[in-house]
C-alpha cells in the first residue's frame, strides 16, 4: 500500500484464538511467542485498548512470507500426496498462499489464516483481525489503488502486502519443490 492515508490499523476479532493451534502466533512486547489467548467476550478490550469487533472469519486460505513460507511448503510436501488435491495456490518471491477448506489448510509457524467477510467478498483478510475502517470502503479503495492486481486480493497487513490469488491453481508437489529450489 503506497498511500499511508489508506493504511488501516488492525485489531483482534472477538473470539479470536491466537496461538499455535490457529497458526497465528501471538508475540509479546519482547517479540517472544506468548501462550494462546483465551477468547474474549463482546465489548472487552485487548491489552492495547482496541475494541474487539466481530467473530473470527472461517479460514479459506493460509499465507506466509519468507522463511515461514518455505516452512509451510515443506510441511505441505510432508503430507500424503492426495492432500494436495484439496488445495489451490499461488506463490511468488518469498510468498506462498494456499486456498482450500479449513480442514485441508496446513498449519505452520508464522503462517496467517485468511477468511472472507461478506462485507468485502473480493478480499481475503486475516481471520483474527479487523481493520479500523469499514471493509466495503477498504475493498473499494484497494481495488482502485491497485487496478493491475486482479481480485480476489489477499491482504497480509503485517507484511504490507496485497496479493492477487486469481491465478491460483491446483497445488502440485513438483511445483512446490521447484519453488523451494529457487533462491530466497
Image (tube, rainbow, N blue to C red):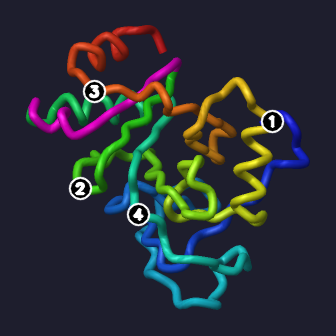
For label 1, the SS is helix
Q: Is residue 169 above or below residue 129?
A: above
Asked whether 90 falls inside the magenta stretch, the response is yes
Asked whether 133 falls inside the magenta stretch, the response is no
- The 10 Å Cα crowd at callout 4, few under 14, some 14 to 19, many 20 or more, is some
Which mark sits nearer the N-terminus, 1 or 2? 2
- The 10 Å Cα crowd at callout 1, few under 14, some 14 to 19, many 20 or more, is some
Whether label 2 touches label 4, CB < 8 Å? no
Q: Where does residue 122 sit, x and y in percent of width and height?
A: 59, 47
| Left or right position of 11 against 111 | right
**Quadrant in which residue 162 is drawn:** top right
* Magenta residues (range): 81-93
For label 2, the SS is helix
Which residue lies under the disc numbered 2? 103
Which residue lies under the disc numbered 4? 58
Which residue lies under the disc numbered 1? 145
Measure the C-alpha gap from mark 2 to mark 4: 11 Å
Could you say which is closer to the camera, residue 181 or residue 91?
91
Task: Name the image quarter holding the N terminus.
Answer: top right
Q: Residue at x 79, y 38 (%)?
A: 144
- Can you tell which mark lies on residue 171? 3
Amino acid at each position: 500500500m503506497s498511500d499511508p492515508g489508506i493504511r488501516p490499523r488492525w485489531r483482534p476479532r472477538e473470539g479470536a484464538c491466537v496461538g499455535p493451534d490457529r497458526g497465528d502466533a501471538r508475540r509479546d512486547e519482547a517479540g517472544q511467542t506468548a501462550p494462546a489467548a483465551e477468547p474474549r467476550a463482546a465489548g472487552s478490550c485487548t491489552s492495547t485498548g482496541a475494541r474487539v469487533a466481530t467473530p473470527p472469519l472461517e479460514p479459506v486460505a493460509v499465507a506466509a512470507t519468507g522463511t515461514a513460507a518455505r516452512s509451510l511448503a515443506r510441511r505441505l510436501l510432508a503430507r500424503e500426496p492426495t492432500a494436495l488435491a484439496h488445495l489451490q495456490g499461488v506463490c511468488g518471491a518469498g510468498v506462498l498462499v494456499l486456498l482450500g477448506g479449513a480442514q485441508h489448510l496446513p498449519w505452520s509457524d508464522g503462517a496467517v489464516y485468511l477468511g472472507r467477510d461478506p462485507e468485502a467478498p473480493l478480499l481475503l483478510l486475516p481471520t483474527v483481525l479487523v481493520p479500523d475502517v469499514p471493509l466495503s470502503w477498504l475493498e473499494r479503495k484497494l481495488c482502485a489503488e491497485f487496478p493491475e492486481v486482479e481480485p480476489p486480493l489477499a491482504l497480509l497487513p503485517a507484511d504490507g502486502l496485497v496479493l492477487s490469488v486469481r491465478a491460483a491453481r491446483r497445488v502440485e508437489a513438483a511445483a512446490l519443490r521447484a519453488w523451494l529450489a529457487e533462491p530466497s
